[in-house]
Image (tube, rainbow, N blue to C red):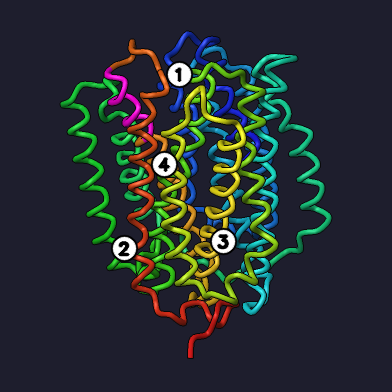
């Protein structure tokens, strides 16, 4: 439900720009506002799940997400859309980490690779259905139905949770770290707002400098604070674990590409190449098809080659294929585009399966909720920064809001996000050859 919503909305951005009378690049606020709310509240998700039970929290989160979806459908301006997408993000902030917590705590360690592979499979159905569904809706109805379609899916999901998800007994989380939560919220909000406004002309330069300064001071203040308390809301001590550190830091670079691509691709196809939303959706599902094809074979590949080798190789291929859309033109053969997207989806899915699994290879069971929380926060910040970075590069390439979005304007954005994605490689090379061997990776002699 969550991924259908996000990918369908990205496909519908050109239609929304006409409905709201807004430049399509500025509509990235509808995407980043959701991620901002998610990243700000997610630090509290682990404590909330431990305090009130993952099953109960997951149900409430789905209800909040559905309420936000309905209100998004009634939006009549960009401001209203941003507000209600923020409400959706509050629900998503609890759905994402709590869902992962349920799976990680329920699966035996020796089967964690398989469990995480299947856990991400439903999320891949969203990108598969989202773009063509958005195109179909825009052909027969109007854009609000992109959000209204969540209601029956969400109700079925809540019934399924009641029927199949067992109550899990979590350790007492102790008192909530309000001070740490406040510091982290200030730092995350300022950082993401600074990234969203830089180079876009939305606020004066002096305001951007102040926001960036607040972000840096907030990050520094939280780091100092988290080292002094026993149970910080974001446990940075987990970064001492090499596998977890590589997963988070390397994954952040990758998610710049993951966030920028779904934002840039519909604009390239619909505005740059003049395609319709339905045709765009049919072609872009190639990425999701490749990702789904990877999931059944991911455990076997990791056992054969190990986490370290898999991450190093897939990082290079992912970075190159992330930049390939810079070559797409009106004369580019459709089969070439589809094949590039399918292979890119397969390799990227392989890399994220390895990343999301090896992150928990050496994490003690008692700290899985803390690890899940920190992981979700960094993941969502990475995706949000990717959208902002892609928008910034596109704005620089076009030289202002009035310039047309021709295909040539997309060369810089796609190459830039490909280069950033490749920065994860050196982090993977620092991993031990035996990294993750006890949870399904290859054990080196």
Is any atom of residue 213 visible in this view?
A: yes
Between tags 4 and 2, which lies in front?
4
> In the drawing, does residue 243 fall left or right of residue 345?
left
> In the drawing, does residue 188 fall left or right of residue 313?
left
Real-space CA distance between mark 3 and mark 2, rounded to the nearest whole angstrom = 29 Å
Between tags 1 and 2, which lies in front?
1
Under tag 1, what secondary structure?
helix
Within 10 Å of disc 3 (Cα), the crowding (few <14, some 14-19, many 20+) is many
Real-space CA distance between mark 3 and mark 4, rounded to the nearest whole angstrom = 21 Å
Under tag 2, what secondary structure?
helix
Identify residue for label 2.
Answer: 226
Identify residue for label 4.
Answer: 323
Identify residue for label 3.
Answer: 353
In primary-sequence order, the first of circles 1 and 4 is: 1
Front-most of residues 388 and 273: 273
- Magenta span includes 398: yes
Identify residue for label 1.
Answer: 24
Q: Vertical placement of 140 versus 118: above or below?
A: above
- Magenta span includes 66: no
Q: Which residue is drawn at 22% across and 41% down?
A: 214
Between tags 3 and 4, which lies in front?
4
Tell me residue 132's x, y (percent): 69, 29
> In the drawing, does residue 166 fall left or right of residue 174?
right
In primary-sequence order, the first of circles 3 and 4 is: 4
Query: Do callouts 4 and 2 mark residues in contact (Cβ within 8 Å)?
Result: no
Quadrant where the N terminus is found in the figure: top right
Quarter residue 195 falls in: top left
Residue furthest out toward the bottom? 445
Tell me residue 143's x, y (percent): 64, 18
Real-space CA distance between mark 1 and mark 2, rounded to the nearest whole angstrom = 40 Å
């Amino acid at each position: 439900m969550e991924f259908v919503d996000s990918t369908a909305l990205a496909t519908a951005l050109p239609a929304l720009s006409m409905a709201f009378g807004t430049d399509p690049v500025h509509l990235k606020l509808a995407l980043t506002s959701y991620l901002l709310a998610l990243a700000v509240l997610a630090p509290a998700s682990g404590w909330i799940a431990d305090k009130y039970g993952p099953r109960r929290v997951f149900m409430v989160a789905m209800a909040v997400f559905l309420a936000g979806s309905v209100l998004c459908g009634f939006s009549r301006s960009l401001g209203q859309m941003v507000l209600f997408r923020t409400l959706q993000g509050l629900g998503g902030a609890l759905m994402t980490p709590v869902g992962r917590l349920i799976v990680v705590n329920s699966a035996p360690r020796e089967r964690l690779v398989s469990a995480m592979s299947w856990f991400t499979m439903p999320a891949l159905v969203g990108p598969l259905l989202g773009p063509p569904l958005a195109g179909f809706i825009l052909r027969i109805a109007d854009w609000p139905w992109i959000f209204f379609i969540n209601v029956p899916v969400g109700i079925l999901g809540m019934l399924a949770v009641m029927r199949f998800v067992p109550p899990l007994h979590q350790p007492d989380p102790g008192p909530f770290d309000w001070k740490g939560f406040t510091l982290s919220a200030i730092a995350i909000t300022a950082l993401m707002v600074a990234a969203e406004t830089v180079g876009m002309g939305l606020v004066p330069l002096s305001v951007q400098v102040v926001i960036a300064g607040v972000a840096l001071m907030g990050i520094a203040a939280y780091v100092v604070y988290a080292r002094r308390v026993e149970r910080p809301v974001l446990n940075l001590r987990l970064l001492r674990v090499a596998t977890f550190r590589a997963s988070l830091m390397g994954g952040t670079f990758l998610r710049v590409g993951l966030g920028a691509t779904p934002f840039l691709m519909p604009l390239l196809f619909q505005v740059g190449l003049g395609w319709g939303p339905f045709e765009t959706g049919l072609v872009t599902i190639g990425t999701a098809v490749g990702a789904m094809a990877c999931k059944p074979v991911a455990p076997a590949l990791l056992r054969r080659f190990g986490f370290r080798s898999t991450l190093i190789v897939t990082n290079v291929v992912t970075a190159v294929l992330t930049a390939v859309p810079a070559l797409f033109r009106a004369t580019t053969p459709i089969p070439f585009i589809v094949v590039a997207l399918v292979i890119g989806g397969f390799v990227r899915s392989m890399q994220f399966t390895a990343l999301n699994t090896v992150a928990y290879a050496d994490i003690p069971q008692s700290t899985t909720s803390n690890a899940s929380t920190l992981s979700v926060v960094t993941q969502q910040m990475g995706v949000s920064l990717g959208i902002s970075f892609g928008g910034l590069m596109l704005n620089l390439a076009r030289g202002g809001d009035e310039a047309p979005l021709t295909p040539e304007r997309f060369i810089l954005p796609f190459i830039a996000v490909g280069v950033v994605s490749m920065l994860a490689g050196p982090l993977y090379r620092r991993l031990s050859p035996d990294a993750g061997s006890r949870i399904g990776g290859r054990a080196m002699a």
